[in-house]
Image: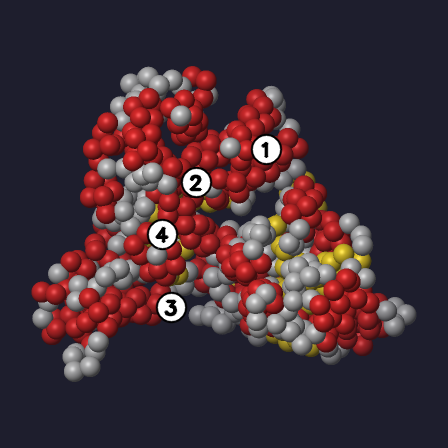
Amino acid sequence: MTSTILDQLRGVASDLFNIPASQITAESSPQTIDAWDSTQHLNFVLALEEKFGLQLSPEEMEQMHNVGEAAKVIENKLQGSR
Amino acid sequence: MTSESKAIDLRSEVDRLISARPISVESAALVSRRLADLWRAEAGSVAAAFLVSRFEKLRGKLPLQPYRLAILRSFTVEPAIPLLRAEAFVHGIDLTVQLGDFNAYPQEILDSNSLLYRFAPDAVILAAQTADLAPELWHRFADLEPEAVPSVIQNVTNNLSQWIRGFRERSSATLVVHSLELPAIPSAGILDAQSEGRQTSSSQCRAIQEINQALHVIANEHRGVYVLDYDGLVARHGRLRWHDERKWLIARMPIAADCLVYQAREWLRFLMPLCGKTAKVLVTDLDNTLWGGIIGEDGMTGIKLSPEYPGAAYQSVQRALLDLTRRGILLAICSKNNPEDAMPALTDHPGMLLKPKDFSAARINWNDKAQNLREIASELNIGTDALAFLDDNPVEREQIRNAMPEVTVLDLPEDPLAFAGAIRDCPAFERLTLSSEDQQRTGLYAAQRERSQAEQSFQSKEDFFRYLDQEAEVVPVSPTTLARVAQLTQKTNQFNLTTRRYTEQQIAELATRPEWQVLSISVRDRFGDHGLVGVAITRDEKDTCEIETFLLSCRVIGRAVETALLSHLAGIAAVRGRRCLSGRFIPTKKNAPARDFYSAHGFQLIEEKPDGSVWSLPLPQHKIASPEWIRLKTTEGAHN
């Protein structure tokens, strides 16, 4: 399950930040991706909300320091909603 | 998961095609179709970023229309911009967007040197929330004395009026103003809707609605100012679903993530007619589209078409199509059927809301639909890019998309009850103004069919022209013809010497300049009135009268109307003392019918360049004879 969500997030990050999905790992973050600034972080959050049909809280948004942590947040959220 | 993997396949196909250097025009067109496929499959923020970055690589290879849009706002709209640009790219528009600062629109509008005007936008959107424009009404309505409400309404209205007037004084760009939304739950609850024994000014909703009504009045007082019904947009998708309070509080983003795409699409509805991206003819299938079932198998009594379920779905489709004809959109039929099966249903079925006279052309046969569509376009004298195609069969739709990518293909859902909604939702049918020609168009084309039949009974063209008994009237543009004149410059592609596009405001502005002439020509004949069908715009400079624009609607091409208009231009230029009438032909993909216009009328070629040729006629020694079979009425170009 984790790998599926993580893969989907790599696809999202690839589209949004315009870099190949193969270069995106769980550790990819605003520090490693130039295009990932604060505006793009909001876009990233909104894109995830739209794609997974959920709303993230400010606390959850802050936990998403990199792609892997974002995947964990989404995963917890999806399990919680079941 | 299959749709997910299909989307990944589309992405890698796109990137494979783009990586080939140089990209051919053909493969750019294929990439564009694949990107549109991807957009249909998953319109949203993720795909939007992908589309925008890929379309940007295809600039110069695709016939994209550049357009500059400024958005003045009171809230965060940044995440909606990639969605808007992706939507625009899919519809052939390359959009450059500039955003104003938060709540800085009054200064931006009233300062002639602001970034807004330096950006030189084609259009400007003013998107401000009720909470920002009228905080007293939104946040503190319960605290307001009823007597104070009218002055609050007046203040907000005055502000809007001042900004709109201030904008129009500084720019001729189109302005689109968001209306004010109503609260999901008024501060007084259900009491807000009860007016008995209470003053009208004690209703929060009604106070906001009053501002919206005033906004419509103000917009009407200015050219090129339109209202986006933001309250209607929010209501359509549900007030509670539209808003995300948390994003508002942390990022000033009031719109929920999954509603951003609807905001982008609503903006696009305005951009389509502004860019001239409009479908003029809707070509519709019959079986399982205009009625349920197959007429050739189920027969008159078996097809579903009635006010009850399931026939009601198809009556709704017919109602939607009738509504389109009122916007000046023509209907045509393209159906794989035996005419002897289909025709009785069209003429006699009691459930038919559409009548045979509502259709301007029909191809009921077993031929390839792309071929039929080309024939319909040619019969109606329009380009195939002005066609829209409605068919319940996804295979037919896909074939048209591949064979004729310029055609607007409506994507129909599975459920027939949702067909009518999909038709009404199509942005290619949006119009911002409606001329009287638009409303009568179906009748105009019916007269055209009678003309064609009459033409065949004459030996020579001249005999036919004499029989037609044409009368043409040339007059300067006036407030009543402004909309139609601007519309013709935006839509005419074939007989158009320079293909220069003008907005209503630009035409209005040119008409006030003494050295410019903006003339229109209207034509009528024994079969009826063609209405306003041609425009000529000239500019005097020293000894020369330069023809900036010369165009004629295709429905009167080839009847010497163009000669009559040109003859008039030469005549009045000589009267104004000009020594030379000069014109330019700028070739496009579509204006070949106008190529030999100047040479055929005795003009000398002065200069020939790939981007156009310059022609000249000495005055007053050269006169252009107006054809004797057209009675030309003119009003002298009195300038206001």
User: Could one spot residue B231 in this view of the protein?
Assistant: yes
Is tag 3's residue or tag 1's residue first in the polypeptide sequence? 1
The span from disc 3 to disc 2 (Cα, nearest Å) is 35 Å
The residue tagged 3 is B220
Horizontal and vertical percent position of residue B133: 22, 57
Q: Identify the chain of the residue marked 3, using the numbered disc in the image.
A: B
* C-alpha span from label 3 to label 1: 42 Å
Q: Residue at x 40, y 19 (%)?
A: A24
Q: Which mark is residue B44?
A: 2
Residue at point 26% right, 54% down?
B129
Residue marked by disc 1? B31
Q: In which quarter of the image is residue B142?
A: bottom left
Q: Distance between the residues labelled 4 and 3?
A: 16 Å
* Relative image position of residue B586 (x, y in whole percent): 63, 46
Instruction: Please tell me which of labels 2 and 1 falls first in the chain.
Output: 1
Residue type (three-letter) at the residue carrying disc 1: Val
Q: How far apart are marks 2 and 1 (CA)?
A: 19 Å
**Residue A43 in the image: above or below residue B212:** above
Q: In which quarter of the image is the C terminus of chain B?
A: bottom left
